[in-house]
Amino acid sequence: MDRLKVTSPAKLNLILDVLAKRPDGYHELQTIFERISLCDEITLIPNKSRKIKIHSSHPHVPKGPGNIAYKAAMMLAQDFSISEGLDINIIKNIPVAAGLAGGSSNAAAVLLGLNRLWQLGLNTKALAGYASRIGSDVAFFIYNTSYALGTGRGELIRPLGIKTKLWHLLVTPRVKMYTPEVFARLKLNLTNKKDSVNILLPFLRKGDIVQLAGSLSNDLEPVILSLRPDFIKLKKKLFDAGASGVCFSGSGPSVFALAKSYKHALSLRAKFDKRYTQAFVVSTL
Ligand code: ATP
């Protein structure tokens, strides 16, 4: 094989429960991931340089070892004594640092792609092991599943065999939210915890959009709104456009509206404030 193209999808969190702060500084989470149709495109091209190089025209994508796709390739190259070089071309469509796990997905796509390109014979469990050493959100993308339950830091994955296809209008405001800052400001409310995952799952299985809309939740929302009170208006605009439910993904700033169908998602986009230029109609992948 002289080159390999891999698709690298984004994720949304339909539920993000923050359960506790752990002694290692991370938070114990319970989340439902949804893989969505907004994707980066990655091409892996072996070269003779003996170096791993990242290429991307996006200004905020790190071009060297700071790129976690680079880290993924380097881990496999070292463990399997691969000395040939590699060009990793990343076409970025997923907004960066937006709560959509674009970087994590790129790293997973490189693990999956190099397993084929370099014929490493790694199974899903072994690939997920590499993934969880790279970052909390990477392992989800190793599994060929639309939805999964994530626990631990988010790296312990249980694929959910759910076939429901959802439609969303996804809006990513052009502001930076720093994940560590959002978690640092979180005041954990350990009382009155409802079992959000088990409430939502039956509605997701049935594709009951009305009930699903009322069951979306993200424990980081109060922090996101305290950092950016103007996002209250953004949520209202999505409801005013006709959204069934609205929720932030990860630590924001991306916010997604639940639509009843593709047509409904298109009508949400048509009615939504045109000043938000990063507004995507997306579906479950
Ligand atoms: P997180 O919640 O982990 O911060 P995110 O989904 O909000 O993730 P990403 O798009 O993954 O955001 O980017 C987070 C940071 O990771 C960026 O600021 C960027 O500097 C760095 N990064 C490293 N590798 C990549 C990559 N392949 N694509 C995008 N960003 C990357």
Image (cartoon, rainbow, N blue to C red):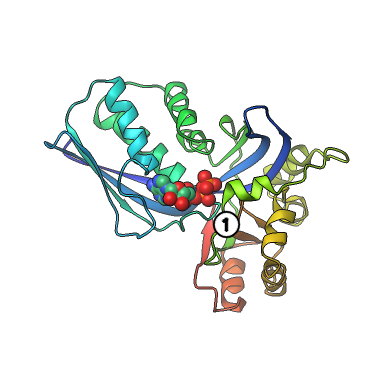
Up-down relation of residue 26 to residue 223 (above or below)? above
Question: Count the marks: how many?
Answer: 1
Position of 119 with respect to 245 (left or right) is left
The residue that disc 1 covers is 177
Residue 254: x and y in percent read 58, 59
Label 1 near ligand 1 (CB < 8 Å): yes
Position of 115 with respect to 281 (left or right) is left
Up-down relation of residue 195 to residue 232 (above or below)? above
Q: Quadrant of residue 194?
A: top right
Residue 45 appears in view: yes
Numbered disc 1: secondary structure: loop
Residue 278: x and y in percent read 50, 68
Give me the residue at 11% from left, 36% from top. Answer: 48
Give me the residue at 54% from left, 42% from top. Answer: 146
Give me the residue at 76% from left, 37% from top. Answer: 198
> In the depicted view, which residue is nearer to us: 264 or 181?
181
Up-down relation of residue 238 to residue 190 (above or below)? below
> In the depicted view, which residue is nearer to us: 165 or 249?
249
Furthest residue in direction right, as rendered: 192
